[in-house]
Amino acid sequence: MPHRLEIALKPELFGAEGEGIKKKARAYFHIRAESVRIVNIVTIDKDLDPAQLEAVRNEIFTNPVTQVSSFKPLDLGFDWCIWVGYRPGVKDNPGHTAIEAIEDVLGISFDPEEGVYTSRRYCIRGEGLNRQDSETIAKELLANDIIQQTRIFSPDQWDPETGTGIIIPKVRLDHTPTVATISIESDRMLQQISDARNLALNPNDIPVIRRYFLEPEVLAERKAVGLDDPTDVELEYICQARSDHCNHNTFRGKFYYSDPAAGISRTIDSLFKTFIEAPTLRLKAEKDWVISVLWDNAGVGRFDENHNYVITGETHNSPSNMEAYGGAITGIVGVYRDPLGTGKGSRLIMGSYGFCVGNRDYNGELKPRLHPRRLLDGVIEGVRDGGNKSGIPTSFGQVTFHHGYMGKCLVFVTALGMMPSGVAGTPAEQKTTTPGDLILMCGGRVGKDGIHGVTASSEIFTEHTPAGHVQIGDPYTQKKMHDFLLEARDLGLIQFITDNGGGGLSSSVGESARFSGGCEVWLDRVPLKYAGLDQWEIWVSESQERMTVAVRPEDVERFLELSEKHAVESTVIGKYTDSGKLYITYEGETCAYVNMDFLARGFPQWEFEAVWIPPEMRGLCEPAMGEPADYGTLLKDMLARPNICSRQWIIRQYDHEVQGTSVIKPLVGKDRDVNSDACVIRPVLTSERGLGFSQALLPFYSQIDAYYMTSGTIDEAVRRLVAVGGDPGHIGGVDNFCWPSIQYDPEKNPDGKFKAAQLVRSCMALSDACLAFGIPLLSGKDSMYVDGHLPGKYGETHKLSALETMQFSATGVIEDINRCVTMDFKLPGDLIYVIGQTDDELGASEYYDMFGYIGLNIARPEPEKLLPMYRSLHTAVCRHLVSSMHGIYRGGLGVHLALCAIGGGLGLSAELDRVPVRTCLRADHVLFSESAGRFIVSVAPENRAEFESLLAKHPLACIGEIRKDGIFEILSGDRTIISLKTAELKAAWKAPFGGLI
Amino acid sequence: MVLQNKKNRVKALVLTGYGLNCDVETAHACGLAGASARCVHINDVISGAVSLKEFQIMIFIGGFSWADDHGAGVIQAVRMRKNAGDKILDFIYRGNLVLGICNGFQTLVNIGLLPGLEGDYTGRTVALTHNDCGNFRDDWVHLQINKDSPCVFTKGLKHMELPVRHGEGKFIAHDSVINRLVTENQVVCRYAVSDGLPAEGRFPENPNGSLLDIAGICDPTGRVFGLMPHPEAFNHPSNHPDRPRFNVLTGRGRISGDSFPATGISIFENAVRFFQ
């Protein structure tokens, strides 16, 4: 008989979480609750005797100091009670740890049929609250119906004896696993099956697949192993491998690019090969610190003679858009498996995040699945739990608000790792599978979760997208696996390792078997969460927290022993061969037999028409706008803009100190509350070397030209690194493209050709800027289809496409962390320099956006001219000539001077007329232009001569000095256009989100 | 730094596994303090594969053991008490030192090793519960150290700055227990404002709403110590958030080099010194 234990905080204690819900209900929905008390429910589906029940109640689930508990419903009293529990099959992490604890305390073990399920009920009191209010709280704050179920009780519906009743969300499939064969009689029939089974096959691939399975030689070989028509396992495997997510068909596609206005047309055979691979290979040849790029789960650079660092970046957009918390935690925990699966395995040392969401206060008629405010809350919490519980510092991040992200949000997650340069006498970055090696699956078990994730992320979100690919990451299981695998690595037990992400085993085994030239997989050996999965489901499930490892037969016993010590499940599921075949069996019956080289041959390249229309021809022009008079209020309003203002509340939720490596933190300054340009960690604790990291994202510029969006973003990432003391001579990059659909369709995507041209131009800029700055692309990913169809007021739908977005992450080794600088002004009397040229470049700027303009004149960085300047600045840092250094980014000089002053808690006097400009500019243009390649640097008066001579060849001017009295004063000509207390600017900058913790 | 020859070095056991995560820096901190540290998996302590008898210092480290799913440190405490409780008690009775940091502190409190009133190391009388601010919080705090405390780890220290990083750090207990802890000087460190006076509950100086600003307590012997802030995360001057500012100001002769706060390593050094 199942038992339901209810646990609550003692009534006299303050319940912070309940208080938080109360606050949100009021702030978001104007619902006034007097109190919200939470009851945690643990439902134990196992026979236990009264003594056992008391033991687990007292020893595990009840803190005698803070909690009360009972196997009968607790009498908390409420006006409304909302129960929230998981749907069957959704990962219940606390339920799993509860099983571990109960087994430990009672010395018993749970059968596969038994389990523990956690849920909660919220007891809400409040005069005048009605059912609709509690439904709003349930639906909009407490639960997401994709993963959770809710029940609402009024006091007269509540039976004090039975309470919520016993609810067991157990998965019961009652299904005998069967392999189906699929008829390939005609292209049309295969297309129909693809649609019916949600395979998302590209119509152009269908004839190739059919041709293969009809080849006489293939037919004969298949017959020998008992196969005829292709099986569902085989087709699912092919679909996974051919999906845009796994195969990057867009980036490997053929682009017919034309710019009719300029009379240019050009065919590009693979954006990846042309603009990513080619420049990176060229730079790898020049830079000996580039250890491994373009093939593994992450790129590898040299940190010092004994260590290499590892970096990669991912996005997790579609799942986060549907279930923000689950999507984001799965995203960050998932990206952490990439370094773990790079070379023979790397220890995780840092993570970062980038969130792009709709406007937080959106109150229009469109109905996104999750309101941007709720979505942002969820993704913040997901990355928080995923990062913090993994024990990896989340040291940097950013949030960008724009209406376009309401169609689909973006969740960027970046991971850095560290490997020794050698493992058991071999280079740690190398790995291979050899015939005879065994295939092991480590970590979590396989369930129905995550099936068709990669194919779903290769589609545009509609209300019919299956929810099955939404998961909840489990950092606890993964952390145990991480510790285990690194110990196994150091003992030399790992020959090859890769993660199970998109495509699951299908992808990890399929790809690792290419090295040995074949494999045999025994699918019946794969441990399952529950019985009844079909063979193809086991093969493609994306259940999280799993790695695939190649182990030599002679090492397997030791590997499994170590695995057991770490309480990690590892299972031999097959072996690598050199048969040239992917050979899968289930209980001895063949369910797949495919030539390993099939995927590499004969599939047609995707093709795109890309037509560029220059901004002038799209009707863009500079606004006819007169000069403002009230600059003080203007600056304060600029500082309070959502994309400029303080987001301290997010940063403080993230552990950026764990591992004890933190040097330059995400928040700096006298009061430790202003955003740093970049972060620096000291990943090898015995060394004074550092690793700097920055990232940038400027999607607004795509409104004019994605070429300059891209070069501007890269320039910003580089400057951010240089600003903390990074060496411009050693920078590795990671590109993460998130693009709306570029496949032209006259009805569904009428501007597809233009968006394709934007992608081509963005890739051109990526290549140009990386070559000019000397940045090899250590890693990169693309996520297409950032569009959504949102219902409107009348039931009509609107396609909303995100801005063409590329996040760029930059990392580099810092020789001596004691030289690092921060952006905050340090001492009154120090001279303030602006370095770099300011021009009439306000196109798509924050300033224009404030007035609803886009403009035309976009910032156009010239990396080859900027790099020497960055080098000179780096020399100045190395000679300790610089007291503070800060790049001028979004919002321009005015905003960033203010941030330097806010960071130092000091004032300044500055004259705009001294700022180096290309042509004569109006004061508001000097203050808010977003020209690239600029810095604000403060320098001690005694260092003036040396600093100026070092930068003599570059645009540079001393525009004023730092003031002790905290007055922020800007002069234009002989007019004082701003005179405010820095404290007032700070208050304005903090106001929008200042109440959030 | 405490210098010793290698052979006689004090040995520290750093407990790892099951989601714990400060192993590398805690072991490093021990090393800087002159101890020889070994990271040992919880299951190796339980199985006896590694004997506590080899060690003088046992450290329960930070992290999220069992994901903190049923209360921070609860399941780790259950497992250790049930499977290694006698070994740990024996370890303490032999005059050795136990340190619990963050999740380790939460675990010591749930095992009952803290506060250990009247030498009873089995009852749960204090708790570390959800922060009043309602969220996980990462920030640096000032600590006022009780010089009258018997705590071995804080001898000679008056004031420290360390990072906190937790969601469940609010120290609560019945008034009578708190009074007892105060009179016995078992309250070792309290959250403070920058001039060293107690924060008196003010956020964010007191980051979690702990009663009496309590950040760390010890047992009556002073040999078992638990605290929420992370001394091991201040293992190098560059960890301190004011370091870049300090570098500029000292470089310009505005302040003297000695005024920079002592790192968290002094806590480990005190532990090593105890055995000399």
Image: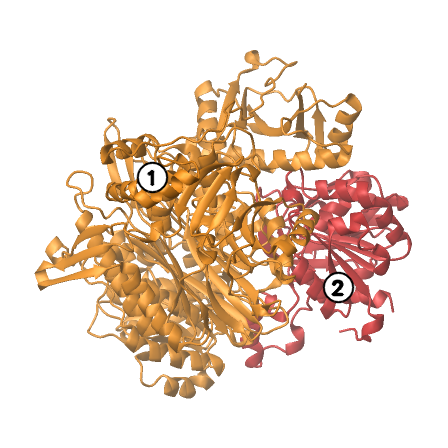
Chain colours: A orange, B red
Q: Quadrant of the rendered structure where residue A93 is?
A: top right
x and y, in percent, of residue A62 in the image: 72, 32
Which of these two is toward me, A250 or A224? A224
Task: Name the residue at 53% across, 68% down.
Answer: A308
x and y, in percent, of residue B140 in the image: 61, 58
- Chain containing mark 1: A
Q: Residues within 10 Å of mark 2 (few under 14, many from 20)?
A: many
Res A716 label? none
Q: Is residue A323 visible?
A: no
Q: Residues within 10 Å of mark 1 (few under 14, many from 20)?
A: few
Depth check, mark 1 against mark 2: the one in front is 2
Q: Amino acid at mark 2?
A: Ala
Q: Amino acid at mark 1?
A: Tyr
Above or below, B29 relative to B52 = below
- Chain containing mark 2: B
1 and 2 marks in contact (CB < 8 Å): no
Task: Name the residue at 21% across, 67% down.
Answer: A840
Side of A589 relative to A61 (left or right):
left
- Which SS class for mark 2? strand
Quadrant the N terminus of chain A occupies: top right
Report whether mark 1 lies on the same chain as mark 2. Answer: no
**Residue behind mark 1:** A362
x and y, in percent, of residue A578 in the image: 47, 55
- Which SS class for mark 1? loop
**Residue behind mark 2:** B37
Disc 1/disc 2 C-alpha distance (Å): 54 Å
Above or below, A994 relative to A799 = below
Side of A602 relative to A555 (left or right):
left
Above or below, A697 relative to A524 = below
Q: Is residue A496 visible?
A: yes
Which of these two is toward me, A970 or A99? A99
